[in-house]
Image (cartoon, rainbow, N blue to C red):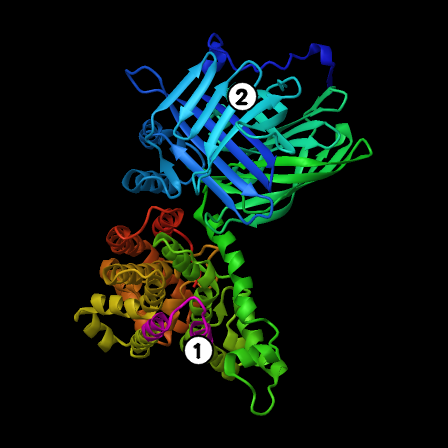
Amino acid sequence: MDLLKDDKMSDKKLLLSFGTESSRSGAPLEWWYFHGCLQEDETIYFMLCVFRNRMERANELSKHGYTAIFSLMNDDKSLYRSASWVDPDFYSYYIDNKEIALRTEINSQLVEAIFYEYKISGPPEPIKINYSPILFKRDPFEFHWDTIHIVQNPDYLLLSFSDPKDGTPHDLKIIPRSPHLEPKHTINLPSGQGMSYLCYPDNDLAIVGGQQPVSATAWFDHQWGDYSWLVRNDEQHSVLGWDWLGINLEDGSEIIVIVHREMPGLHPIGAYALIRNQDREILETHDVVIKPQRYWLSPKTGILYPVAMLVLIPELKAEFQFTPVTDNQEIPVFGLQRAVWQGAGNVSGQIDNKSIIGTARGELNGYGYLFKLDDYLKHQAEKIDPIIESFFPKIIREEHLQSYAGKAEGEYFPSAVSEFLAEPVWDLLSRKGKRWRPIFTQLLMGALGKDSGPYEAMLYCLAELVHTGSLIIDDIEDASLLRRGEEAIHIRYGQDLAINAANTLYFLPITLLFEHPALDEKQKLEIYQLMTRQYIRAHLGQGQDLYFTRNMNPHNLDKWMNDSLEPKLFQTYSLKTGAPLQGLAETAAIIARAGQECRKACGSFASAFGVTFQIIDDIHNFSHSPNWTKTSGEDLTEGKMTYVIYESLKNAPENDRIKLYNILTSKELRKDPDLIQEGVSIIMESGSLDICREKARSIIRPAWESVSVYLQPTEQRLLLKLLTIHLVDMDLEK
């Protein structure tokens, strides 16, 4: 622990004039950060951060590029506004230099897709390319960009910015109460210098041209260094992030806490805490642990943030809790991290056995990197079941039955309904499918510029409950033994209960449509007609699929192979798998009040997505991966005609083709597990899996291009594009 007395600290003069300080002015990365709290008629929290990036191009002098983020929030959380800017020079520089990102652990396909979308559509809303001229001076420090102005005076800073929503100007004067702090390099990184830090944690805040507020405080930081603070400059090129807290205690003490992390796996690579107590003594230590206490899932980005934290500093006998004023304090940022959480909060706990209380600002940086889209899908899936359960609970009560079927003429029997309906349905739902259908629909609606929040219960239930019913029936029709690694529902509960439960799920979500308060009668009728048509189409597709299986024999197979079987298979897929998703996509377009051409494009894209999924699902049927939760080769055992089997019959060597043909067309041979495994090996060695995967790509790519012209440049559009690309390569469960 280091202990520095007051006589070793600088005076209160603002140390921002460093035109001769090459270590600062020449740093590749630099930022100025402000946050504070104004109290007049109401409490207003604000945050502003300006970033300077050195842009280096071959045969050119280095130039500077800038980004800025800022936010405002009132105390009752009824208003939260944020803005995120990037200047055009840095924007073009960034999208032309993706090589570093491609060397990190971020999935290269995701990187390519994100940079492509940046180039075609610009940054996702509400990030803005701000073309206003920028003035930057160092001696004395001065920065002007649109409505952001920072001007240095010897004893204070003038800070101006405007409300991101209504343009109301805020002109502030930041006056240091206490000498500045210069913490040591927070982390001694082996691959670079990291960041240097100049901090004024204790400042008065005055409104320029107005009366002094009753109570107003502000925090100001200046940091500079190299990019090793963000990405390790070694063979691994790990992407880095951090949890940071700036704390003002009621006794006059200030605390800085940071834990630096490798974001893949969230592994700490170092930590640091600084406390300047009320006696102006400075205590420093690297013995710091931050433990998440509660998480918040952003509805816009799908990023999971540990917004409530327990901080442990054993060397200082400190243990305290950070609690946000409100969870939703996310700010979009330009780049692969997509967003940061920058939030006002409070702290309480103990230091050296004495109770403490105070205000704080938390920063959670790096949580938005997408290393695998599966991580995003997992977090999204976890929020879907509670919403479904609010409509269709695991324990059915009288009030639920009345909402589904109206007032009882005699007497309802809720416990019976729970047993014969809710129990088997939630047995299957609890086996945790990917839930990609509701996720797909939610993202499409966001890409159409419509907030899906008020419609999520209806959309999730239309997507997932109806799909769950179709799975139960599908397993009965196919005589399947397993579903998602466990007994199929008709095996576990009996065929009668399974059929009844499945049929109920086809109709139950429609009650949400009829009673939805945000839909007008025309929209309700359109959606009802649309979904009814798509359910009919899905059952026609299922019947066609069953026809192939029931009539599988040598004579019919020869006939089918010589009579346009491929387009018939794709029509089956379009009906069976594509139609329900097409209905959901067009429902999203109806809710968003999109035009007919847009609605048609959304439906066609969803149908192509469904067909692509079915092809990938066929491929996975011959997988030995532990992620595949059905019996490998089950399609062959059932004698099903799938696109994978069709391509295998076309492309396998002659002797293998004959063996596969004989197994497929003989019920007796298909009962032999050894022959089934031989058939699986033939299919896997025929090259058909790669052919089918490429066919899937050829279907989904043009479908995306056709619909993308109607989609707005939102975070949801970007994620929908990533889901579209990822679909062809990911392990999906039905």
The x and y percentages for residue 697 are 28, 52
Q: In this view, does 580 lie above or below 254?
A: below
Residue found 40% across the figure and 64% down from its top: 633
Residue 598 in sight in this render: yes
Mark 2: give few (<14), some (14-19) or many (20+) Cα within 10 Å. Answer: many
CA separation in Å, label 1 and label 2: 64 Å
The x and y percentages for residue 132 are 34, 29
Q: Nearer the viewer, mark 1 or mark 2?
A: 2
Predominant SS of the magenta segment: helix
Q: Give the range drawn in magenta.
A: 508-530
Residue 191 in sight in this render: no
Helix, strand or loop status at disc 2? strand
Verify whether residue 512 appears in magenta: yes
Residue 507, disc? 1
Left/right of residue 541 with respect to residue 79 in the rendered view: left
The x and y percentages for residue 73 are 54, 42
Q: Which residue, given by chain and number where applicable, does mark 2 sit on?
A: 157
Helix, strand or loop status at disc 1? helix
Return the disc, 1 or 2, that comes first in the chain's sequence.
2
Left/right of residue 150 with respect to residue 322 in the rendered view: left
Residue 119, disc? none
Left/right of residue 177 with respect to residue 611 in the rendered view: right
The reply to whether dot 1 and dot 2 touch (C-beta < 8 Å) is no
Residue found 62% across the figure and 18% down from its top: 182
Q: In this view, does 233 lie above or below 468?
A: above
**Kind of residue at disc 2:** Leu
Q: Which quarter of the figure has residue 252?
A: top right
Indicate the quadrant containing the C terminus: top left, top right, bottom left or bottom right. Answer: bottom left
**Kind of residue at disc 1:** Phe
